[in-house]
Structure formats: C-alpha cells, structure tokens
Image (cartoon, rainbow, N blue to C red):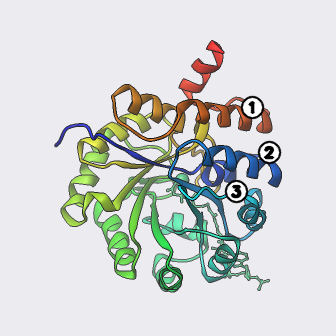
Amino acid sequence: MGRWPNFVQLKEVGPRDGLQNEKRQVSTEDKVRFINMLSDSGVKEIEYSSFVHPKWVPQLSDAYEVGKRIKRNPQVRYSALVPNQKGLELALEAGIDAASVFMSASETHNKKNINKTIADTFPVLRGVISEAKNANKHVTGYVSTVFDCPYEGNISPSQVIYVCDTLLEAGVDDISLGDTIGTAVPSQVEQLLEEILKRYPKEKIIMHYHDTRGMAIANIMTSMKYGITRFDSSVGGLGGCPYAPGAAGNVATNDVLYLMHGMGIKTGIQERKIQQSAFYMQEKLGKALPSKSLTYYAAQE
Ligand code: HMG
Ligand code: MG
C-alpha cells in the first residue's frame, strides 16, 4: 500500500445520479443553470443526464434539451448514461464527449434496473460500446452492486470480475465500480481491490460510493491506499438509485473536496463554487442536502 496521491480526479454526477432520485422535478432551465455553474468550478468531467426510458426515470426525461442547452466548457468532458442503442443515438445528437454504459454485477438488480438478465445485457452493451467508440467517444462502464445487492446480499469479487472482463473486452476505456446501496466498509473495499488490481491497471478504475451509512469517506481513504485516484461524487450528496430501495445519494463532492484539500491533495476544483451550486440546488429542491461540510459552511455564512 502506498502514500497518499498528489492529485485526485473527481467526476461530478449530481446532475444525473443526484437528480434521478429527487422527488421534486427540477425544471430544464434550472438544470442547465446548475450544470453551467458546475462547468465553471474546475471539475473536469460532468455526467449531465441520462438517456434512459423517460417512464423509468421521469426526472431526467429532458436529457436531450439539457444536452442541447448547456454551455460547454472545452476543459470539461460531458458524459451521459446510455442503456442501449436508442439512448446512444439521442445522446450523440444532444452532444456527449463520453458515454456511460451501465449494468449490475447482481442478476436481480440488473433485471430490476434495466429489465434484462446479465447475459442478455452484454450483446446490447457491446453494440453501444462499439458504436460510441466508432464515434470517437470515451466510454465508461459502470458496474453496480459490486459489494452488496439489495435483493441478493453479498456479491463475490469473482462475479464483479466476470462483468468487468466482459465490458473491458467489449472496449470500455475504464470501469466505475458502484457501491450502489452504500453498504460497504473498508475491509470489503480491500477485499475487492486486492482482486481487481491483480487484473487491471489502477488508472482504469473509478470508485463510485453512495453514502447511505456514512462510510463513503472511509472507503475513499481505503481506495487511495490502493492507488485509486478517480472517484465519482455528487454536489451536496444529492440523489440515489431509483431501483435500489433505501439507497442514499453519492458521497458529497463538498465533503470529498474538504478531505482532499485538507490533506494537500489537489483536485483542480474550487470548493466555494461547489458550495454555491449546492446552495442553488437546495433552493430548487426546497430541502437541505446531506453534505456535512455544506451544513457547516452554511452556518458560517
Ligand atoms: P425496456 O422496456 O426493456 O425496453 O427497458 P425495450 O428495449 O423493450 O423497449 C420498450 C420501449 O421503450 C420501446 O418503445 C423503445 O423504443 C423504448 P415502444 O416501441 O414500446 O414505443 N425505449 C426507449 N425510449 C427512450 N430512451 C431509451 C429507450 N430504450 C427503449 N433509451 C431500458 C429497458 C434499459 C430502456 C429501461 O429499463 C430503462 O430505461 N432503465 C433505466 C433504469 C435507470 O436509469 N436506473 C438508474 C440508473 S443506474 C444507477 O443509478 C447506478 C449507477 O449510478 C452506478 C451505481 O450507483 O452503482 C450508474
Ligand atoms: Mg450511483
């Protein structure tokens, strides 16, 4: 196990993973403004929406309009979630630099989330990945429920590796490993990363922690000890997964920045701008967001 890294790269997933699970519908205009604020924060990648079926995730049914209307910062990579060929076509038209395909390591969660078995998902995603690569897009493969599944319980590292192997063979550039329901503790992270890093270079691995039980920061620290320097996070800790009952939002970008900057680890992101975009979204949602450092910061203002 190594020293702390000098630099950590964060992908902001609040506009997608965050807003997909918020009860109150945010208007297209407010989403565009939110993403434009994030684009100006120094963050290098923003997942701006999701081209899934609008009946499955109505909160993001305006993905196309959002993609057309956001002001693109050339320093930022804009990505979106795409489940299939139809989603990819729309995403390419709306404008993406990167496509995020997704599936689950757990059979039951995969079925509930995308209405297919794992075996039936692979051919669909192979087609999407190959078309996205032909269009010169970066492709990230999300693998959900890599520690625990809300329906099946513990998921073995060998099952996670089977899905990762198949996605990497299909041509994804990197893999984001999701603690979808936020159950993992650092010993589980160690157990999985021991196996994962025997097979794949650490640069290809992104960790995606939901903070349901407040373990995400501990899990990020553990991941960094294994040399992982790429994490997904969400402004204010927005969100969850609509097909994972009880799951809370991602680890809050605000809290990750407090941690990294406090440890002298660079992110290139301005904390103050992230706080401002969190305040903006709190106002639009009419509720406080869970980030602890945001709550503290608000009390000082
Ligand atoms: P399905 O019903 O099986 O789709 O849904 P289908 O292929 O049978 O098609 C049925 C109809 O849907 C057809 O229309 C298609 O055209 C239409 P009809 O001919 O009946 O009029 N359709 C679409 N329309 C718009 N956009 C599309 C699309 N695809 C088909 N892309 C599907 C399959 C995958 C589409 C559906 O199950 C779905 O949208 N699921 C999304 C669920 C979701 O978004 N979950 C949350 C995101 S994942 C997550 O949060 C986890 C993550 O954060 C990582 C972690 O935390 O671990 C990434
Ligand atoms: Mg997620």
Q: Are marks 2 and 1 in contact (CB under 8 Å)?
A: yes
Q: Nearer the viewer, residue 272 or 161?
A: 272
Q: CA distance from mark 3 to mark 1?
A: 27 Å
Say which residue label 2 marks: 24
Find residue 93 and report its image quarter: bottom right
Mark sitting earlier along the chain (2/1): 2
Q: Nearer the viewer, residue 79 or 245?
A: 79
Mark 3, secondary structure of its residue: loop
Q: Residue at x 73, y 64 (%)?
A: 63
Q: CA distance from mark 2 to mark 1?
A: 10 Å
Instruction: Find residue 71 and report its horizontal and vertical position in percent.
Output: 70, 56
Q: Which mark is residue 287?
A: 1
The image shows residue 237, relative to residue 125, as above or below, that is above
Q: Is residue 168 visible?
A: yes
Mark 2, secondary structure of its residue: loop
Tell me which amino acid carries mark 3. Answer: Lys
Q: Residue at x 66, y 73 (%)?
A: 91
Q: Please indicate whether residue 79 sits to the left or right of residue 20 in the image.
A: left
Find residue 119 and report its image quarter: bottom left
Say which residue label 3 marks: 71
